[in-house]
Amino acid sequence: MSYEVVGITILWTFLFGYLIVASVDFGAGFFSYYTAVVTRHENKVHNIIQRYLTPVWEVTNVFLIFFVVGLVGFFPDTAYFYGTALLVPGSLAIVLLALRGAYYAYNTYGSSKENDKIYMTIYGATGLLLPAALSTILALSEGGIITETNGKVRLDWIQFFSNPYTWSVVILALVSVLYISAMFLSYYAKRAEDQHSFELLRRYALFWSGPTILACVFVFFQINRQNPEHFENMLNMSWMFIASLICFLIAVYFVWKKVNLGWAFVLVMLQFAFAWYGYGRSHLPYILYNQISIYESFTNETMAIALIIAFIAGLFILIPSLILLLRLFLFDSKYVRGHSPKKG
Amino acid sequence: MVDLDPVTLSRMLTGLTLIVHIVFASIGVGVPLMIALAEWRGIRKNDPHYTLLARRWARGFVISVAVGVVTGTSIGLQLSLLWPTFMRVAGQAIALPLFMETFAFFVEAIFLGIYLYTWERFKKPMIHLLLLIPVVLGSSASAFFITSLNAFMNAPQGFTLKNGVFAEFKPLVAMFNPATPTKVSHVLASSYTASAGLLAGIAAYSLLRGRKEAYFKKALKLTVISTFVFAVSTAIIGDFSGKFLAKYQPEKLAAGEWHFETTDRAPLIYGGVMDESGSIKYAIKIPYALSILAGNSPNTEVIGLNEFPVDERPSLKIHYLFDTMVTIGGLLVLIPLIYMFRHRLSRKGNKRGYPKWLLVCLVLLGPLAMAATELGWLYAEFGRQPWIVRGYMKVAHAATTQDTVGYMIILFLALYIVLCLSCVKVLAKLFRNKDVVEEMRELGIHAKGGMKP
Ligand code: HDD
Ligand code: HEM
Ligand code: HEM
């Protein structure tokens, strides 16, 4: 593999990590809001969600930072094109992320015992707005919307909003978030031996599985309209998308039958992994169609090697720490069931 | 405001975000160290007061970390959004520390999460304390990495510029540039000072409001002595920073000191005003002091501002920023010194407690130290103007070309106001709802110290 491909693979993997952890988090925000404020179910689902999220929320954010910093590091031109074009949408996304993160911490670590309505609303609303906003960057990457004329980079807003492809990606992002999140939370509720929440979350998971797969198919064909070259590449790797579909079917079957819930979630991750890497691979060599190619916009070789070494060294610290975190909080049944002492 | 040019607006927005971020970043770097110190004393002296102190600090700390994280995310993305050309070019030399910083964040975030939820989970309290080490190392490492990037902007090296093309990049050389040692150590020391000062201020505030429990006195002693130690080291390192400037960035020192002609035996000008003709009034002149700051000897030649072309000189206003920072630096040493003296006296039989004026001064330690941090950064950043990468790239050529930055300033100003106000509100409520004495009773700790039999 060339350095370019190693670089983009590392970044794509971190974005995948963000996709999974953040989806659980975003969806959890929505479900919390929905069960507690809209349907006025008792707070049980919310408690499950809190127990999982509390120790990990800050980690989620770092995945995103890592991706952005790494992207600019490996491919400095991305800062120039995306950075200039995304000033307004990027700033709005920062505001949403900031409100979400801060209010989450205020509510969880602050002393208010009752869950504040304002907080729940901010948390629920940003849970949907953020994936919608962030996913549009994938739509932009297909080209034709960011233009450079006379050395000035511009984003064509009309083209952007009137494009069905943009909307198909937004819809896919929204339903996937709810699907991934519900799949994970029903597994977690089962581990917590909370039968009631489990039943509720399982229903959500099954409910959102249909729209998810429909949205996938819809996006698939919209790419053909938007960028036939990319679509052609995707067809050449169609096995990845078929593998994704198979994982989806088995995962839903498991949840339907209420068996192997851990495996069901692993399959959900595989489903998205196949689709994610298939999409990413067929997108190459472009990061932004016809403007940023990984080969022409690569950083210098010394920096690339330095970044890759730093990355490998970083993994040696990161992976054991992550395993420790998961063992203490995700796989420790005492903690999951809520028998462990509360926060300091 | 909206019709200023994108360059000015980008500078304003960057400055705004960093001014907010640095408050929480300094707390993020310094407070874990203070928590570790308190918890360690608690274990060693078997005194539950210190453990409770660590616990209560940690509880407030998470709230401020949250704001640190979100404002940090904000500046992290804004670097690319507002300075695309800078990131495109300088990124080739300096992406490494930014990239490594994210690993430091990861470690910090993971272990902080674990630390907060495991107060009673281990049989040996020492294991719990050990969890704090990665948090301290992680936050200090992130300060190191980000500051080395800032150091590079002041003393760039590790690349060549031929015919307008940057080439032959050496990331490690760029990272370990001449500014890195003084800058990083001064930033770390000042973060520790600011955090210790802030916590000292909180303890003094409780005493001022009439609390008498031993808990608050112990908290005060620990934090004030720490402030003293850190403030002395900050000042010593600040002196090294001056020597760095004299050698590598003389225009910043000269502008800060209103020093125009290159001479030896240069006096240090403190305060004062300058009229249109450039003559300085009402200033205190300390003979030889600038030469000593620049090179430890009155015979050191200090380069004056006249050696630089007019359009490459920073604003002369930074003089006041520097003077105020140094004045505060002096106060941060002096106030703890008075306290320690009083403390000595009161141990020798004079049991009157602390006088009110001293407690008021101690409350001010926190705000003063934060102000010094802000002033120091403003001095360092305005003093680099008009350069973004000194000698290579001017700020005017690095900014975004978008003309919507003005609206973004309004957006972010609103965001930061909301974040800061709600943060203060949440913190105040947190500590009001759970009084120390009440918590000590819950945990079975005597107000006078020691466990109940
Ligand atoms: C608690 C905060 C604090 C205190 C008490 C001081 N400083 Fe400071 N100073 C900082 C906090 C700070 C800082 C925020 O950390 C800066 C901004 C950028 C940097 O490198 O450190 C800084 C910058 C800074 C610079 C510019 C460095 C550069 O641009 O590269 C100099 C020359 C000094 N300081 C010198 C001093 C001296 C002689 C002090 C004597 C008392 C002093 N500082 C006290
Ligand atoms: C956290 C403490 C910091 C504060 C309070 C601060 C403050 C400021 C201010 C006020 C400006 C505007 C300067 C002007 O318009 O004259 C500025 C500019 C800037 N700062 Fe800093 N800064 C800090 C740290 C850093 C660090 C660590 C970096 C590097 C990663 C950095 C990168 C920049 C950049 C890129 C600009 C824009 C270019 C310029 O105006 O020179 N700053 N900062
Ligand atoms: C241009 C300058 C800066 C950038 C781009 C930046 C970036 C960031 C980012 C992205 C985060 C959030 C990390 C997360 O998600 O966990 C963060 C937090 C943090 N930053 Fe900054 N930062 C800057 C300036 C500084 C400075 C000058 C310091 C130290 C003196 C600093 C120290 C920290 C610390 C310790 C945190 C962790 C939050 C906490 O524990 O409170 N940063 N920063």
Image (spheres, coloured by chain):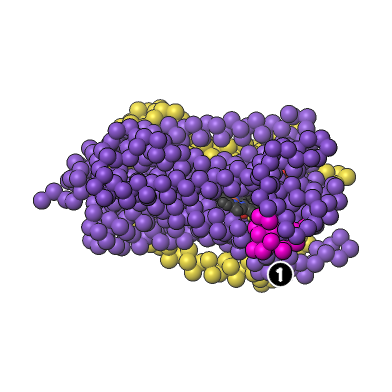
Q: State the residue at coordinates (27%, 39%).
A: B352
- The colour with which the image depicts chain A is yellow
| Position of residue A256 measured from the top left corner of the image (x, y, whole percent) | 38, 47
Quarter of image, res B402: top right
- Note whether B3 is above or below B323 in the view shown: above
Label 1 sits on what residue type?
Lys
Quadrant placement of the N terminus of chain B: top right
Left or right? Give the position of B408 relative to B344: right
Asked if residue B296 is among those painted magenta in the image, a careful observer would answer: yes
User: Does residue A139 appear anywhere in the picture?
Assistant: no
Q: State the residue at coordinates (69%, 31%).
A: B407
- Note whether A205 is above or below B169 in the view shown: above
| Position of residue B412 measured from the top left corner of the image (x, y, whole percent) | 61, 35
Q: State the residue at coordinates (49%, 69%).
A: A316
Left or right? Give the position of B2 relative to B33: right
- Note whether B364 is above or below A317 in the view shown: above
Q: Which region is colored magenta?
A: B288-303
Q: State the residue at coordinates (55%, 55%).
A: B235
Residue placed under numbered mark 1 in the picture: B170
| Position of residue B399 measured from the top left corner of the image (x, y, whole percent) | 76, 45
Which chain letter goes with mark 1? B
Q: Nearer the viewer, residue A211 or A78?
A: A78
Q: Which chain, by letter, is purple?
A: B
Left or right? Give the position of B415 relative to A101: right
Quarter of image, res B179: bottom right
Numbered disc total: 1
Label 1: element kind: loop
